Image (cartoon, rainbow, N blue to C red):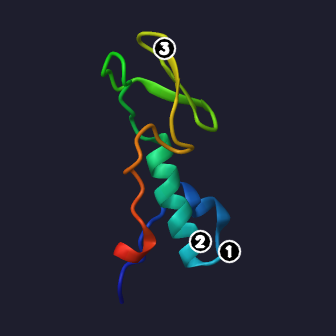
């Protein structure tokens, strides 16, 4: 019998919503909660304040970025699996 993959934070949904939806959400949340580099001081201390607004905890800079990450290429597209 094959082992089931653990999805980390989306285990809270249990058997609801389906595998594909939970897998996509797990990818987005892993990118969102990961470490992000500040574009000004290059320290991995940037944290999301709100959708598209980021703040560096080291230098105090506030800047805009993508909704779930600072960079554009963080989330893989579904068709390239």
**Mark 3 / mark 2, whichever is N-terminal:** 2
Q: Observer-nearest residue: 12 or 80?
A: 80
Q: Nearer the viewer, mark 3 or mark 2?
A: 3
Q: Residue furthest left?
A: 42
Residue 34 located left or right of residue 68: left
Q: Where does the N terminus fall, quadrant-wise?
A: bottom left
* Quarter of image, res 42: top left
The x and y percentages for residue 23 are: 51, 68
Q: Is residue 8 visible?
A: no
The x and y percentages for residue 3 are: 37, 79
Label 2 Cα crowd, 10 Å radius (few <14 / some 14-19 / many 20+) = few
Mark 1–mark 2 CB contact (< 8 Å): yes
Q: Residue furthest top?
A: 59
- What label sits on residue 17 in the rendered view? 1
To which residue does mark 2 refer? 21
Residue 21 located left or right of residue 47: right
Residue at (54% x, 54% y) in the render: 9
Q: Observer-nearest residue: 70 or 10?
A: 70
Real-space CA distance between mark 3 and mark 2, rounded to the nearest whole angstrom:
34 Å
Q: Observer-nearest residue: 54 or 26?
A: 54
- What label sits on residue 61 in the rendered view? 3
Query: SS of the residue at dot 1?
Result: loop
The x and y percentages for residue 11 are: 57, 62
Query: SS of the residue at dot 3?
Result: loop
* Quarter of image, res 10: bottom right
């Amino acid at each position: 019998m094959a082992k089931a993959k653990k999805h980390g934070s989306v285990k809270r949904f249990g058997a609801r919503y389906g595998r594909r939806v939970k897998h996509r959400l797990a990818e987005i949340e892993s990118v969102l909660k990961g470490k992000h580099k500040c574009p000004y001081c290059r320290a991995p201390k940037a944290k999301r304040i709100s959708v598209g607004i980021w703040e560096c905890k080291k230098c105090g800079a506030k800047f805009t970025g993508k909704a779930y990450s600072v960079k554009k290429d963080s989330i893989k597209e579904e068709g390239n699996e």
